[in-house]
Image: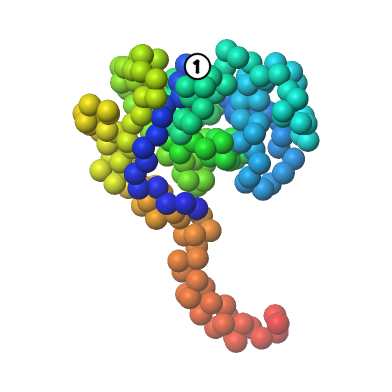
Amino acid sequence: MKPFVTHTGILAPLDRANVDTDAIIPKQFLKSIKKTGFGAHLFDEWRYLDHGEPGMDLTQRVKNPDFVLNQDRYEKATILIARENFGCGSSREHAPWAIEDYGFRVILATSFADIFFSNCFKNGLLPVVLSGEIIDRLFKSTYANEGYALTIDLENQSIVLPSNEKISFQMDAFRKHCLMNGLDDIGLTMQHSESIKAFEMTYYQKNSWLL
């Protein structure tokens, strides 16, 4: 998993509440357990005017010109801003896979669904909870300024605005450590690989009949 320390990126405003995981990545695209290839179908039913299925030629599909990610000014956005209860619905881990694969590194919202929130950290995404007042302010700044960008400083738990004003955010210390060091569940386990090997060697020496 790619470590997250600081990130500077353009904001894309998804001005919706209760964005569920089926909207993030529709169910017909859940046939793979690879973590790549899902970004092409992120928000598929909102990005396109036709119904999407795996294997379709995306160049032949009709895009929804009103959807935010289809607008030129947000083409290079890597920070997503939304409203409350982002990531609700089913617990599919494909949702953060799709968001990360599309190119987003940070999601800003007033609240997140619990399982989605946890899955973000396991896949290199930083979900940041901010007050409704701050989210409103960021939406207004994003709409008013093309190319509006922020710097997210995880180490200092702050968001740096173009004016150099800093907005602080809260972060669980363990999740912060894992994200900054690029440690998912497997990475955390592999930190103890020598101890695991030593245990297995001793265990099988005492229980040779298992071999």
Question: Does 147 sit above or below residue 16?
Answer: below
- Residue 17 horizontal side relative to residue 149, left or right: right
Question: Seen in the image, is 156 located left or right of residue 119?
Answer: left
Q: Secondary structure at mark 1?
A: loop
In the picture, residue 163 is in which quadrant? Answer: top left
38 w.r.t. 139: above or below: below
User: 16 above or below 152?
Assistant: above
Question: In this figure, which residue is indicated by the disc labeled 1?
Answer: 16
Locate residue 44: give its quadrant: top right
- At label 1, counting other C-alpha atoms closer than 10 Å, the crowd grade (few under 14, some 14-19, many 20 or more) is few
Left or right: where 112 falls relative to 132: right
Residue under the point 27% across and 33% down: 160
What residue lies at 57% left-to-right and 82% top-to-bottom?
201
User: In the rendering, at what x and y percent does residue 42 appear?
Assistant: 61, 30
Q: Which amino acid lies under the numbered mark 1 shown in the image of this protein? A: Arg
The image quadrant where one finds the C terminus is bottom right
